[in-house]
């Protein structure tokens, strides 16, 4: 387990401005997903949420963090996320980019900030009292 007392949190959302080239619906997708509801062919679509997060949703991390896909991330005040994507390298960190689903600019801006973050590389090692933390338990 790693703790970041003041990690930078940002958000990414559904929309053609975030779309990976070649997606059939023009939407965003994550590199890997453990959630079968978000599979479309060979693409894992990040289509959950709208400024609120379901249990759990996607987070992108910095490649320099060397964390495995599937690691569990708890962002205080936001809930649980699973590492399913990488952001561009070289950004100042630590930084976590939360998937917010279809959201307005105001909803997206409200997700930017500095928050305490817990990171577990093995989801099986998350203590039950930590896994039950809300607003979206693991």
Image (spheres, rainbow, N blue to C red):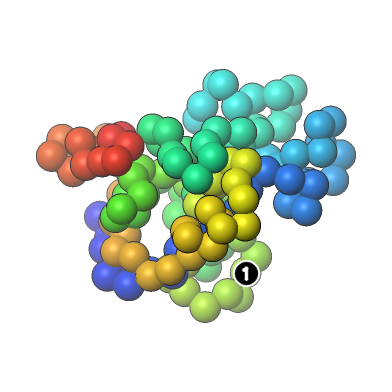
Q: Is residue 87 above or below residue 132?
A: below
| Residue lying at 52% horizontally and 68% vertically, measured from the top left | 64
| Residue lying at 48% horizontally and 65% vertically, measured from the top left | 112
Quadrant of the frame with the N terminus: bottom left
Q: Is residue 65 left or right of residue 90?
A: left
Query: What x and y, as percent, mark residue 41?
Result: 74, 23
Q: Is residue 125 left or right of residue 25?
A: left
Figure quadrant of residue 138: top left
Q: Which residue is nearer to you in this view: 7 or 17?
A: 17
Q: Which residue is mark 1?
A: 89
| Residue lying at 62% horizontally and 69% vertically, measured from the top left | 89
Image label count:
1
Query: What x and y, as percent, mark residue 72?
Result: 36, 44
Q: Is residue 94 above or below residue 26?
A: below
Q: Is residue 102 left or right of residue 41?
A: left
Q: Which residue is nearer to you in this view: 107 or 3?
A: 107
Q: Is residue 124 left or right of residue 7?
A: left
Q: Is residue 7 above or below residue 1?
A: below
Mark 1: few/some/many CA within 10 Å (<14, 14-19, 20+): few
Is disc 1 placed on a helix, strand or loop?
Answer: loop
Q: Is residue 61 visible?
A: no
Query: What x and y, as percent, mark residue 42?
Result: 73, 28
Q: Which residue is nearer to you in this view: 42 or 76?
A: 76
Query: What x and y, as percent, mark residue 107?
Result: 53, 53
Q: Which residue is nearer to you in this view: 11 or 94?
A: 11
| Residue lying at 85% horizontally and 45% vertically, measured from the top left | 21
């Amino acid at each position: 387990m790693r703790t970041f007392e003041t990690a930078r949190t940002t958000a990414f959302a559904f929309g053609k401005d975030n779309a990976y080239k070649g997606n059939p619906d023009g939407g965003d997708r994550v590199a890997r997903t453990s959630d079968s509801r978000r599979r479309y062919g060979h693409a894992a679509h990040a289509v959950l949420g709208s400024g609120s997060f379901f249990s759990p949703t996607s987070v992108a991390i910095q490649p320099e963090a060397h964390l495995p896909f599937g690691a569990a991330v708890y962002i205080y005040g936001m809930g649980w996320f699973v590492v399913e994507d990488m952001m561009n390298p070289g950004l100042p960190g630590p930084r976590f980019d939360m998937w917010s689903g279809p959201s307005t600019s105001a909803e997206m801006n409200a997700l930017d900030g500095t928050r305490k973050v817990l990171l577990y590389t093995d989801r099986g090692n998350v203590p039950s009292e930590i896994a039950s933390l809300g607003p979206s338990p693991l």
